[in-house]
Structure formats: structure tokens, C-alpha cells
Amino acid sequence: QLAGYVHRAVRAEVALAAAAGATLRLQRGKRIVEVKPGGRDKGTAVVAFMSETPFHGRRPVFVGDDLTDEFGFAAVESLGGWAVKVGGGATRAHYRLPDVDAVRVWLAAAVSAGEPG
């Protein structure tokens, strides 16, 4: 019941911001609603990060468990990186881990080996 109230309140605030000229959009996830600028998503963020000096020329890794992560998965894979979906559900990620504990094990092994794959 509270979740429904919060969701309606967020939608109302986004509508007010849009009426004031802001270009915002809502993206629903499993148990979240992201409010973000229009034309921006986790994929555009990955591309922007990867163009910065500390990241340029490196292989990106994106681990996520929600619908809101799918744009990030697509961007990372287009850049030759690893997209890893955690848990079930349809995804564009080429790799999958069953749960957060498996992510911890995989990351520890990647650090020990010197690379994620």
C-alpha cells in the first residue's frame, strides 16, 4: 500500500517538473522507479564514463539485476565488455550469475586472476 502511494507521489512530482520544462522520464524496474533526464540511461552513462581518461581503452564490466540495467548491458557489450545479469528473467546480457553471493565469488576470482573473464 505504501509502495503504491510513493509511486503515485513520484509520478506527480515528475509531472510537475515536466510541466515546468524539465525533460524527465520514469523507468520502472522490479521494485524501483528511476527518474532520469530524457535521453539518458545507464547505457549513456557507461559510454560517457568509457570516454574519460581513466577508463578509455579499458574493457567495461556491468553487473545488474534489474530491467533498468538492460541499457547498461547493451552499451558494455557494444564496447567489447562483459554484461552480467544477476538472477532470473529475460536479458540481453551474455553472462549470468544466480545471486549476489555468486557475484562476490566471481569478482574475487577476477581480482585474483587480474581480469574479469
Image (cartoon, rainbow, N blue to C red):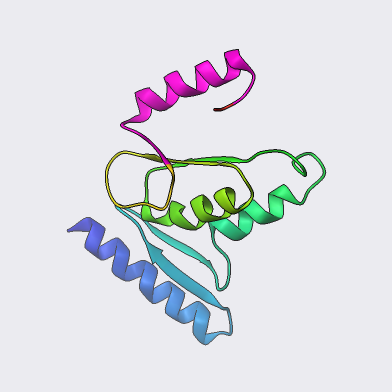
* Magenta-highlighted residues: 95-115
Question: Of all residues shown, which one is farthest toward the left?
Answer: 1
| Residue at 25% over, 64% down | 5
Q: Is residue 17 left or right of residue 32?
A: right
The answer to whether 53 is drawn above or below residue 99 in the figure is below
Q: Position of residue 85 (x, y in %)?
A: 40, 42
Q: Position of residue 117 (x, y in %)?
A: 54, 27
Q: Is residue 24 magenta?
A: no
Q: Nearer the viewer, residue 15 or 117?
A: 117
The answer to whether 94 is drawn above or below residue 45 in the figure is above
| Residue at 27% over, 43% down | 88
Q: Is residue 78 left or right of residue 106?
A: right
- The total number of labels drawn is 0
Q: Main secondary structure of the magenta part?
A: helix
Question: Of all residues shown, which one is farthest toward the right?
Answer: 53
| Residue at 51% over, 81% down | 18
The answer to whether 88 is drawn above or below residue 38 in the figure is above
Q: Is residue 117 left or right of residue 2?
A: right
| Residue at 62% over, 55% down | 45
Q: Is residue 99 magenta?
A: yes
Question: Of all residues shown, which one is farthest toward the top?
Answer: 112
Query: For residue 58, what is the image quadrant?
Result: top right
Instruction: Give the quadrant of the N terminus.
Output: bottom left
Q: Position of residue 12 (x, y in %)?
A: 38, 76
Q: Position of residue 97 (x, y in %)?
A: 36, 32
